[in-house]
Image (cartoon, coloured by chain):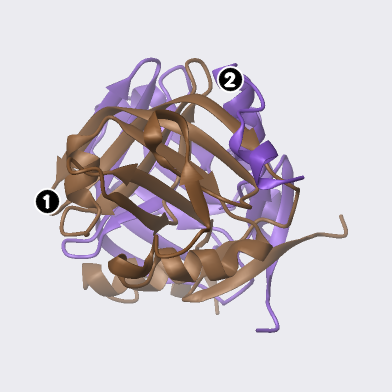
Chain colours: A brown, B purple
Amino acid sequence: MTDDDLAAPTTDDPLTVFKEAFRRHAAGVAVVTARDAEGTPVGFTATSLASLAAVPPLATFNMARTASSWPAVAETDEVIVHLLGLRNRDLARRMAGPAALRFAGDHWTDGPNGVPLLDGVTAWMTGTIVERVPVHGSAVVVVRIGTGGVGEDDDALLYHDRHYLRPVHLDD
Amino acid sequence: MTDDDLAAPTTDDPLTVFKEAFRRHAAGVAVVTARDAEGTPVGFTATSLASLAAVPPLATFNMARTASSWPAVAETDEVIVHLLGLRNRDLARRMAGPAALRFAGDHWTDGPNGVPLLDGVTAWMTGTIVERVPVHGSAVVVVRIGTGGVGEDDDALLYHDRHYLRPVHLDD
């Protein structure tokens, strides 16, 4: 493949472009938890977690406003963001599975503000929602980080092209 | 470490919490390019690239409003988002280095709308900026994806705890 081939758009269909590009992108896996207005725990796997600023400490995640957890995120100001390690991949699958099963078990406790805190993750941090930016059917959520803790170290869990992976260091 | 140890906040200092948590997070590496109001090419390495929606195709990235590229991103509506592979790590370092050297060379051409298009990446997509959300000294930028292309396949380039890494598949 030459540079000319690369420079030429391979398709003008934006959805195909988007899918092909993000298929080349890898992301760390986080889980966001909250409680809805009735106090029911909700949570979901997010591959969109990103830092926004260190001072003050801010982070963002993205979600569909059709997601089962959206009403809770729209109503509450308090979430917990968990960082997942390789040992947490069953947890990742569970929190991406049927909503009714995500908190069926003893894999969580009440954390700060009563927000569900998942056991055994590599790190967690409380987030106070400071912005919800609706864009079409989705939303960007900005949280300000408060307290938190770290668990036993582990490889970061990655999600890439519909598979879980782990990172390895390069030789150089 | 027991679950009780994990559930207890290890520190109440938000900046320490933020740093310790994101040290456990891995992210794919992207480069965003644009031209400023004078037509000068600008670009920067971003580990915050995330998909927001597929229909319509939207993505987000975060940046400091003190960044050398911010004035261009604040003024232009057109950027190109590049996904980087393992072979692009010198490009990643260059685009995170001194701004004056980022486009010194023949590693780029004019892409759609005259926006700098970097050679040899695994994928690229044009983005029309639809939202800039200032939050303290930073901004969340939302782009709508247009055209794009893919390059030769490669492992996704990862950034984790100040190192470049590559992903490997798990056995299960």
Q: Relative to B63, say whether A94 is above or below.
A: below
The N terminus of chain A, quarter of image: bottom right
User: As displayed, is residue A39 above or below residue A162?
Assistant: above
**Residue depicted at 42% across the width and 61% down the height:** B124
Q: Nearer the viewer, residue A75 or A55?
A: A75
* Residue behind mark 2: B15
Chain name for mark 1:
A
State the image coordinates of residue A149 (x, y, percent, origin top left).
62, 34
Q: Name the residue under label 1.
A: A136
Q: Do the residues labelled 1 and 2 touch (CB within 8 Å)?
A: no
Find residue B171 and report its image quarter: bottom right
Q: Residue B45, relative to residue B171: is it above or below?
A: above
Q: Nearer the viewer, residue A6 or A155?
A: A155
In-image side of B14 versus B57 (left or right): right
- What residue appears at the point 26 percent right and 49 percent down from the top-left corner? A40
The number of discs equals 2
- The quarter of the rendered structure image containing the C terminus of chain A is bottom right
Image position of B153 with respect to A32: above or below: below
Same chain letter for marks 1 and 2: no
Can residue B129 be seen here? The reply is: no
Secondary structure found at label 1? loop
Residue A119 screen position, x and y as percent? 58, 51
Please tell me whether mark 1 or mark 2 is closer to you in this view.
Answer: 2
How many C-alpha atoms fall within 10 Å of the one at disc 2: few (<14), some, or many (≥20)?
some
Amino acid type shown at disc 2: Leu
Q: Residue furthest left?
A: A136
Spot occupied by residue B144 in the image (x, y as percentages of width and height):
22, 52
* Mark 1 residue type: His
Q: Can residue A39 be seen in this view?
A: yes
Question: How far across and down, in percent of the image, does residue B148 sit?
Answer: 34, 65
